[in-house]
Structure formats: structure tokens, C-alpha cells
Image: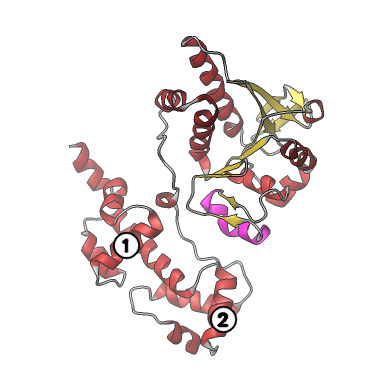
Amino acid sequence: MVMKRVSILVPRGAILGSIEGPRQVLSESNKYLESVGREPMFEISLAALTPETPAAGGRYRIFADKLIGEIQSTDLIIIPALDGDIPQLLEANKEFIPWIVQRYNEGADVASLCVGAFLLASTGLINGKRCATHWMFANYFRKMFPQVNLVEDKIITDENGIYSSGGAFSYLNLILYLVEKFAGRDIAVFMSKAFQIDIERRSQSPFQIFHGQKDHEDEPIIKAQEFIEKNFSDRISVEQLSSMIALSRRNFERRFKKATSNTVMEYIQRVKIEAAKKGLETGRKTVNEVMYDVGYSDPKAFRVIFKKITGLTPVEYKNRYNKESLALMEY
């Protein structure tokens, strides 16, 4: 295998762990390869705009191995997660953008971690392509980059040499994915055991919390959203909502989708399932009792919708997140 030159970017406002985490996993992969008599796979460089870059509000300083102007060729660029005001961070790191684009056009792969997806999207390289980011930033991402196909539930995307990961520490799943791609499955499995990472995790749906998007100025739609959220246990129809705010059904559905990024029925379902998740996380109610509380009467339909939204069945979700269920399992 040919050694891969990896450039881990050090942007201003980067989250330190998403720089050090990939560096550690790739470095340990090299050590393990050497321990079994194989050549190391990754030549790792921290690449920055300046020799030193502050991190975590100035608590730490990251020293670059190279400035990006010194790197004329690389095989893999890793864009770490960012923390802070996104537009300001994109402005502060705009010098990375032409460099990333040029390296990609010359054959380099590019991977973004968590909120690093915003810097990746700023390059234009993923227009019309799939991308993942932290679910908490999904609505904001869609607003800034409507031309990108955001896949909110995914932990990993892989399209035309461009990769992205979901939120927070799920970036480690993408790093393992890249280790497997370049060094082999056996190395990735060993690293998953060494770092105790679930190598098969592919969805961030179980971790999502639905907050209805209300950062828009369509007051009638906000009124409809608030009605849904207060009356989710009732049977609510599109006709009822459109009549309530004096809009035609067609106009109401169009404006609702534009404002919330959900159809009316998707929004109703997500509000109901979010309430069901909370019911399953706390207390001793059965799955059926929670189901009735949120306005479902058909167990099969409830199970199908719940799994579609969360990636887990109601029973699986309760067993994973209910404190009393966990205590019984441990007992």
C-alpha cells in the first residue's frame, strides 16, 4: 500500500478534540501496522494559516507542522469541527477555501467533521451532493447552503472523494471508516477496540432532539406550529390548520414546507415522536401507554414511524435511555 499524506487543517475556532482525535487514531494505526510488520500508512501534518493557532478561547495553542502554502500536494484533507459564530469563522478561515478546492481538483480526498461541514460547503464542492453535520445545526446549515443535500440522520457520507460526519464524537466513526478504506478492515477493527468506538454505528437519529424550526418570519406558520406543539395528542388535519390561519391548503402546505423544512404531516409526526421519546425516557409507562398519550392508537404504525425518525424501535429506545430500564438490565 502507498502511504497517504494526510493534512489535518487547523482553522481558527477549531475544536481541539477534532484535531487531536484524528491525529491520535491515525498515529496509533501507524504504530499498530509497524507492530505487525507492515509499513505505516499515514504521513500526518497539521496544516494551518499561521505557525500558531489559538484554540478553546485561547486556552490552548496549536502549533502547525506546515502552513498550507507549503503543501502543494496531499492525499487527504481533514476539516475539523468549528465552535463559535459560523459566519465569522468562515470569514476568518476563507484562505483555506481556494487551497482545499485546488487540492481536491488535483486528486485529494476531503473529509469534514461535524460542524466543519460549514467550511466544506463554503468551497462549493458539495453543491448537489450529500453532506452530514451535527443535527443541532441542521436547520441553520440548510438555510446557509440550500444547494447541498443535507442528510440529517447520517453519521457518515461518502461521495466522489468527499466525506462528512455527523455531530460531536461521531467524527471518530468517519476516521475509522477512512482507516478501513486506506489501511484495511483489520486495522480499523483493532482501532475500534483500542479506542472503544462502535465501528458499525451509521446513524445519529437516536441522538436527535426535535426543535421545530421557528427562526422564520411567517407568522401564520408559527401559529400553526405552536398549535401542533400544544395539541399533539389530538388528531390534527392539514385542512384544520389551513382553515385556522385562513390559507388555502395548497398555499399553506407550500409555505409550511418552506418555513420549517418539513411537510405538515412530517412536522406533526416529529412533534408526537419527540413527546413519545420523553415519555419513554422517564417514568414507568409502557410503550403502549406512551403511544396513546401522544395520539397514536395503532401499535404497528407507531412503531414504524418511531423507527423511521429515531432509527430505533420504541422498546429499543426505552431500553437504551430509560434510567429504570437500564437499572433492571444491570441488575
Residue 117 position within the rendered picture, expressed as x and y whole percent measured from the top left? 63, 46
Q: Which amino acid does label 1 sit on?
A: Val
Whether the magenta-drawn stretch holds residue 136 is answered as yes
Q: What residue type is labelled 2?
A: Pro
Residue 100 position within the rendered picture, expressed as x and y whole percent measured from the top left? 74, 39
What secondary structure do most residues of the magenta stretch adopt?
helix
The residue indicated by pointer 2 is 220
Q: Is residue 44 left or right of residue 275?
A: right
The residue drawn where x is 68% and y is 50% is 121
Give the mark nearer the N terminus: 1 vs 2: 2
Q: What stretch is highlighted in magenta?
A: 133-145
The residue indicated by pointer 1 is 304
Q: Is residue 112 left or right of residue 68?
A: left
Residue 172 image label: none
The reply to whether residue 85 is in sight is no
Quarter of the image where one finds residue 198? top left
Q: In this view, does 257 lie above or below 312?
A: below
Q: What element carries label 2?
A: helix
Q: In this view, does 129 lie above or below 239?
A: above
